[in-house]
Amino acid sequence: MIRISAVPIFEDNYIWVLQLGTHAIAVDPGDALPLIHYLKENGLELTAVLITHHHHDHIDGLPVLWSHYQMPVYGPAGIKNVSNPVKEGETLRLLDTHIQVIATPGHTLDHLSYLAADALFCGDTLFASGCGRIFEGSPAQMHASLQKLAAYPDSTLVCCTHEYTLSNLNFALSVEPNNTALIARMQSASTLRQQNLSTLPSTIGQEKAINPFLRCEHSDVIAAAQTQNPQAKSTVDVFAALRKWKDNFR
């Protein structure tokens, strides 16, 4: 059975590690040394890496990792040190399990997510209680990517790359202050962070109950979005209004 762990790096990033026996694969290693330490401490050999997109905090550990392990690196085409480019619809066979490659453009145009062992490794597309900024894509692209991820079973784990949960929850409560599931999540997440524990992974079911970016068809979310853009009526317009609001939210 595959075990999934999160290795913290930088201020708020995680490298996700999937392990089976003494073999492991890592997702988005922005920093090599904490990952190497984790692997040695747990007696693991790194056999592959998955990359979601080209931002430095997701790929900068690759050269050092390659010098230690010479492992294949799967990810979007055109990224330096990606040895095995992959795209939407492909399936990898790693750690004796199938890993589905999912195109999720929006944050970047090349963004990929991966479904493995009933867990989504979604980089900077879907966050706990939020979503990534739109740097290269369009609101329509990001909304479609999120809808694609939301279609997976409610029990699917959401393994995103950043510990942004509390700030995302603060924004979500501004959108839906009376959402009881959201209030409960804020309480539990706050307790975890006070103990310096991770709030991740989330689940698709939880995100559909509390994440405003997955709730653009709900009347309270529409009403909140229309305080920012009175013309926001379609779900894409509502999403765009929420994302613009979040970009400037403090």
Image (tube, rainbow, N blue to C red):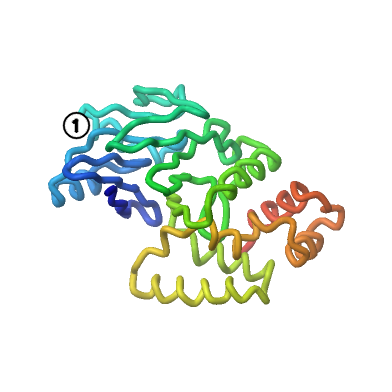
Q: Residue 48, how many percent across, how many down?
A: 28, 33
Tell me the residue at 19%/46% (across/down).
39
On screen, 124 above or below 110? below
Tell me the residue at 50%/67% (across/down).
166
Q: Point out the image quarter for the C terminus.
A: bottom right
Q: Amino acid at mark 1?
A: Tyr
On screen, 63 above or below 250? above
Tell me the residue at 44%/39% (across/down).
114
Q: In the depicted view, which residue is nearer to us: 56 or 212?
A: 212
On screen, 222 above or below 85? below
Q: Can residue 64 be seen in the rendering of this structure? A: no
Q: Quadrant of residue 139?
A: top right
Q: Which residue is mark 1?
A: 69
Q: Residue 232, how many percent across, how many down?
A: 82, 53
Tell me the residue at 47%/53% (across/down).
156
Q: Secondary structure at mark 1?
A: helix
Q: Is residue 236 left or right of residue 157?
A: right
